[in-house]
């Protein structure tokens, strides 16, 4: 907002919550991700990330890691892990309960577009920002690319894991959708919509 903060509203009542991060020492243009408990949020943009308590506007944890500055941040579905990425091709995996850096890895490109954890947090899928033709599946514990999906022909619009995490659907800008097996790295089918 123009008053240098992030504002929120209660969806059930429509009533405004207190302004989040209203202090002048926060840069404008930051992004906010709610954590699954809806009591905490991650706030970041071009600098360190902060986990804040939404009730009293206090910083619980702050981290920046091995990246120059955080340009993208992705949170696991259960809120236990996060991957922070910078525009220099570096990424860090964080334990959000402790704020500890678990590991770091190098992306095969400088700027990440999409990032998504599998439901069991064992895999992390990434695409390059602006014109990705491949999706890279990472093993979170080994930090190695296990699969390169997508075919390299069409530009990727979106990726999503199945509920079990053993399949990935990739949507392309031309309306094509393909389904991949993450255990075998094989394409199962594709269809034009």
Image (cartoon, rainbow, N blue to C red):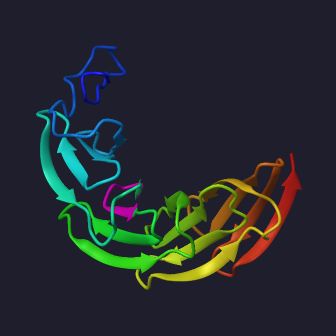
In this view, 99 is above or below 141: above
Query: Which quarter of the image is occupied by the N terminus?
Result: top left
In this view, 10 is above or below 180: above
Q: Residue at x 78, y 72 (%)?
A: 187
Q: Residue at x 46, y 63 (%)?
A: 87
Q: Is residue 27 magenta?
A: no
Residue 110 position within the rendered picture, expressed as x and y whole percent measured from the top left: 52, 68
Residue 183 position within the rendered picture, expressed as x and y whole percent measured from the top left: 63, 79
Q: Is residue 77 magenta?
A: yes
Q: Residue at x 56, y 76 (%)?
A: 108
The residue furthest right is 192
| Quarter of the image where one finds residue 53 | top left
Residue 147 position within the rendered picture, expressed as x and y whole percent measured from the top left: 64, 79
Instruction: State the count of labels.
Output: 0
Q: Is residue 134 left or right of residue 125?
A: right
| Quarter of the image where one finds residue 166 | bottom right
Residue span colored magenta: 76-84
Q: Residue at x 16, y 39 (%)?
A: 25
Residue 137 position within the rendered picture, expressed as x and y whole percent measured from the top left: 58, 73
Query: Which quarter of the image is occupied by the C terminus?
Result: top right
User: Between 75 and 25, which is closer to the camera in this rendering?
Assistant: 25
In this view, 67 is above or below 159: below
User: Between 20 and 137, which is closer to the camera in this rendering?
Assistant: 20
């Amino acid at each position: 907002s123009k008053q240098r903060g992030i504002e929120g509203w209660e969806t059930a009542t429509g009533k405004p919550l207190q302004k989040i991060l209203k202090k002048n020492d926060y840069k404008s243009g930051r992004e906010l991700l709610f954590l699954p408990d809806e009591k905490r949020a991650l706030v970041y943009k071009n600098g360190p990330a902060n986990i804040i308590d939404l009730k009293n506007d206090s910083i619980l944890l702050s981290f920046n890691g091995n990246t120059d500055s955080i340009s993208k941040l992705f949170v696991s579905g259960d809120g236990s892990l996060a991957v922070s990425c910078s525009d220099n091709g570096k990424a860090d995996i964080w334990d959000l309960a402790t704020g500890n850096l678990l590991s770091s890895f190098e992306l095969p490109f400088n700027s990440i577009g999409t990032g998504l954890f599998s439901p069991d947090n064992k895999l992390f899928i990434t695409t390059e920002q602006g014109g990705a033709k491949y999706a890279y599946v990472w093993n979170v514990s080994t930090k190695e690319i296990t699969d390169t999906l997508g075919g390299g022909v069409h530009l990727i619009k979106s990726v999503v894991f199945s509920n079990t995490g053993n399949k990935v659907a990739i949507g392309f800008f031309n309306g094509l959708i393909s389904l991949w097996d993450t255990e075998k790295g094989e394409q199962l089918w594709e269809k034009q919509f």
